[in-house]
Image (cartoon, rainbow, N blue to C red):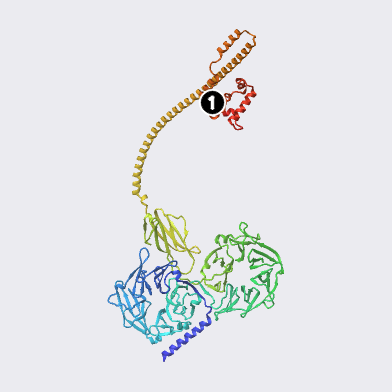
Amino acid sequence: MKKRMLRCFYLSFGCLLLVIQAMAAPRIPYIPQVVNYSVGEYKAGNQNWAVAQGADGLMYFGNNRGLLQFDGTRWTLYPLPTNLAVRSIYIDSNNRIYVGSFEEFGYFEANPQNKLVYTSLKAKVKDFSFMNDEVWTIHQKDKNIFFQCFGSYFVFNGKEVKGVRPQRGPLYFHKVNNNMYSSLLGSGFCFFDGINQKEVVPGIALNRDDVVAVLPMDNKLLLLTDSHGLFLYDGFKAVPWQTEADLFLKRSTMNRAVMTSDSLYILGSVSDGLVALDKTARMVWHINRENHLINNTVLGLACDKQNNVWIALDNGIAQIQTSSSFDFYEPLDVQIGMVHDMVRKDNFLYLVSNQGAYSIADESQSPVILPNSKGQNWYIEDLDGQLFCGNNKGTLQIQNKEASFFPGAESGGTAIRKCTIHGKEILLQSSYSVLSVFTKDVAGKWRFSHNIKGFSNLIKRLEVDPAGNIWANHMYKGVYRIQLNATLDSVKELEYITNPDSTRKESALNVMMLRGRVVITDGYQFYMYEDLSQKVVPFNELNNQFKGMGDTYRIVPVNNDLYWFIRSSEYVLVGFENGRYEAKARIPFGLFDNPPIEDRGNIYVDEAGISYFCLNGGIARYNKGKQLPQSHVSLLLSSVRVYNRHKETYQFLPVSGFASLDYSFNNIQFAFSYPNFLGKEFRMQYKLEGFDTNWVDGAADFTKDYSNLPYGSYVLHAKVVNNVGEVLASSSYEFEISRPFYRSYIAFGVYFILIILLLIAIIKAYITWEINRENKAIEQEKKEREEQLKTQEQLIIKLQNEKLEDELTYKSKELASATLSVISHNDFLEALKKEVQMQQLSGTYSKKYFEKLIRMIDENLSSEDAWLVFQNNFDRIHENFFRSLRTHYPDLTPGDLRLCALLRLNMPTKDMARMQNLSVRGVEAARYRLRKKLDIPEGKSLVDFMIEFK
């Protein structure tokens, strides 16, 4: 009776606690970051049965195709000799990886090249018959390793393996606080001392259900059953532990459980993903396929050193970052679109998006769209207890989950600011066209007052500085600086700023406030408005500290010394300390599955300093004060691969110690592992001492290649740097590349001898060459002399011939002249003789006198034909000139031949006329007739023809 009363008391007290928690706790279902890995990423089998973390920080998964290793960057599969699935994994302190399979078990160990090598233990089992024994759990107790199967188990003591098939076969072995327990199929919960199983909780106390997982809870044990929820075992008895997840636990068929380092109980099911409970039995979250989990069937669970939960799934692998500073809310039943702004008020969370304005009550978990808010909404602000919402159709006032338009504020509101201008406190709103002013009525409520005259433009943001200048940011172009008149109803002064830096191409500007100062960005750098000079000048302090952040388009204050800078690709948390700005954290858009659209990122900071990120389809909650696990992650050298490009072969080197390489393997690839699974951004940097002069950034796959390294000694330094420049981990590797044989000392000795021999040969060859050169020079000189003498002789002969020819020509001309003179003389005598004979006949003188005169003339006449003599001599001198003429031109008369001879001698026409007893005209007529006979073309000289004729 007393026990029953105590049990009722415990149950009542537990229910009371749950009611109190339900009333006090916010119910918006935030979940931590979920990272899924599909088959396409890890390139192995669909099903994953077990998961564990090695001493080196790497994650290992029991996969359908073998042991799957993940170092944060690369996946590597190590199949078993049987090519069957790995069902269970246990890793000891020496990083020996024990695995179990169907009728097979053993362990993997890394060789010096850091490749896992498998050793089977099955052959060590003696006197045991295998009967479909499949290893489902592996545990270590003292120095023994237990491989548990359904109905049997094996014990490995480091040397031998013993197979045991007890009368009551275990369903599972469990180890908690160095104690081992076993659960029997529908028959209770037992303590296992390594030999015997002693029942400590009868099956009836567990509703004849199977215990699938055991976790510590203070000085008790938390027993997870298949379908009857949780039980607390205090060493004496087990009682049900009522939780907010009981409905889930009883309908989902539970399978695995693990506890995180911050005492969060993660319970995995076969059909509906997993839930997280805290020690107060409150359900912290429920994650399944509906909210980002890749698969609902949980087959294995483990918590790593950084408090991440790893899930082996029926189809894929998932990681839940329970220690991340972020958790997320994305409605499952409503597509809310791109969230532009949000605010928290009176236990309601209000979101505005391009779909509408939504309210989320803590107890409802689902967003409800507010009336009149459908369409584009740009902002929501809590101003003195009134909620303002900028809708495309006008300005909305939200109250009691109702939204109504402010009368008169009919332009779509894009931004609103509470400010003081000319001593008057107002609300100033921008829109697609006008600037609107809101003032308070007698009841202290904000009401629409009027639109400002003299300005109309498309404004997306606005700021008001302490001097009362209105800074209106055009949606696509520059910035307007506006001053109002004293009554705040019209523009007094207007300045348009388009391009603060004239050396750059004009671009869109963004305006924001930082510590009471107007800040402008143009995509390249920061500018500020200098009150004294009333000019926009570079903001050197920010430009020097944050190079490349000139694309910041929004600054959101967290407090007076902490600000969010929102850029096109990241959020930067900037602190102001000791008079300078400093980056505290960088959060890339890539961290989110649904980042904001370009230029629309926004952050809401509540009164507690918690930041809410507006995302596409949901929000993210950021708690900078959340304590992350202080687990140091080492930078590991995974492999060193060297390549011989001549033989096209490669080999792996040991990853520790000193390595000496043959010169032919001077192409090296280093692969590193940095098993940091917190989802933070970091990068690798390398410096090869002996080769590099500066640190260089590495590739995203954590590999570094060096090609054609010269011989020598090297030390590779590698480090991991986070996004604010802090060094997170480092590593080094020392190696040398030996001299190639052609640069070895033996080779240098051979080179020296060869050089000496070569020098001797060169000297000998040079001497021989010099002698030959001198001999050749002498021969050449001799030859040149002979050639010169021969040339001189030929020249002399030529000159002599030319002289003889000239003399012969001269003589021939003399001969011709003489002959012609003789001919002329004979002609004269013949003419004289005829004249005398005529006188004789006339009888003037005596006959005797005439006979004597004629006899004297005959004695002086040549007996030979003078022209015939001339022709013969002329032919000899002029190479048969007349014979050739007769041959070519047989129709030529003797007179023609004589004319040809005189033309060849180039005699003047007068001389030819005298010698032929012709007049000059007669000679010209004879020349004309001769030209016709010879058929000489017009333009060709007759004299030239005769001289050239042969």
Q: Residue furthest bottom?
A: 1
* Residue at screen point 35% across, 47% down: 748
Look at label 1 and name its amino acid: Phe
**Would you say 82 lies left or right of 431 here?**
left
**Secondary structure of residue under mark 1:** helix
**Would you say 321 lies left or right of 136 here?**
right
**Would you say 528 lies left or right of 159 here?**
right
In this orientation, does residue 254 appear? yes
Judging by the rendered image, the residue that carries numbered circle 1 is 882
**Measured from the top left, where is residue 628 in percent x and y?**
47, 71
Q: Is residue 855 above or below residue 308?
A: above
Q: Is residue 692 above or below residue 192?
A: above
429 or 507, nearer to the observer: 507
**Measured from the top left, where is residue 468 in percent x and y?**
67, 66
262 or 889, nearer to the observer: 889
Q: Is residue 749 above or below residue 336?
A: above
